[in-house]
Amino acid sequence: MTRTFTAIVHKKNDIYIAECPEIGTVSQGYTIEEAVANLQEATELYLEEFPTQQSFRPILTTFEIAVHA
């Protein structure tokens, strides 16, 4: 069985950080591809230890705020 999960990636300094909001796993890498591959591995290992059938799909949206200098 194959399941699809979300990877949210952001850059902090010289490292990309990838998060899976459905499971709560986080990993990192020096490239986006490496961060997502590491996240995939971390999520697979997590689910081997803590299997879950329930999964939610996150809603991705944006919002604006006023920034005062």
Image (tube, rainbow, N blue to C red):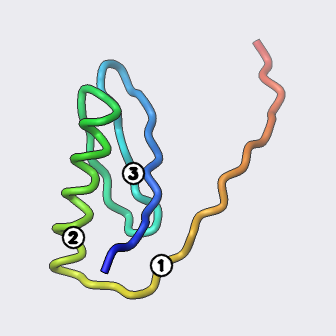
Dot 2 falls on a residue whose secondary structure is helix
Pointer 2 residue? 46
Mark sitting earlier along the chain (1/2): 2
Circle 2: is it few (<14), some (14-19), or many (20+) Cα within 10 Å?
some
Discs 3, 2 touching: Cβ within 8 Å: no
Dot 3 falls on a residue whose secondary structure is strand
State the mark number for residue 55: 1
Pointer 3 residue? 19
Residue 57 % position (x, y): 57, 69
Separation (CA) of disc 1 from disc 3: 15 Å
Separation (CA) of disc 3 from disc 2: 13 Å
Residue found at x 31% / y 19%: 14
Find the residue positioned furthest to the front. Answer: 1
Left or right of 21 in this view: 26: left
Question: With respect to residue 50, does 22 lie above or below?
Answer: above
For the N terminus, the image quarter is: bottom left
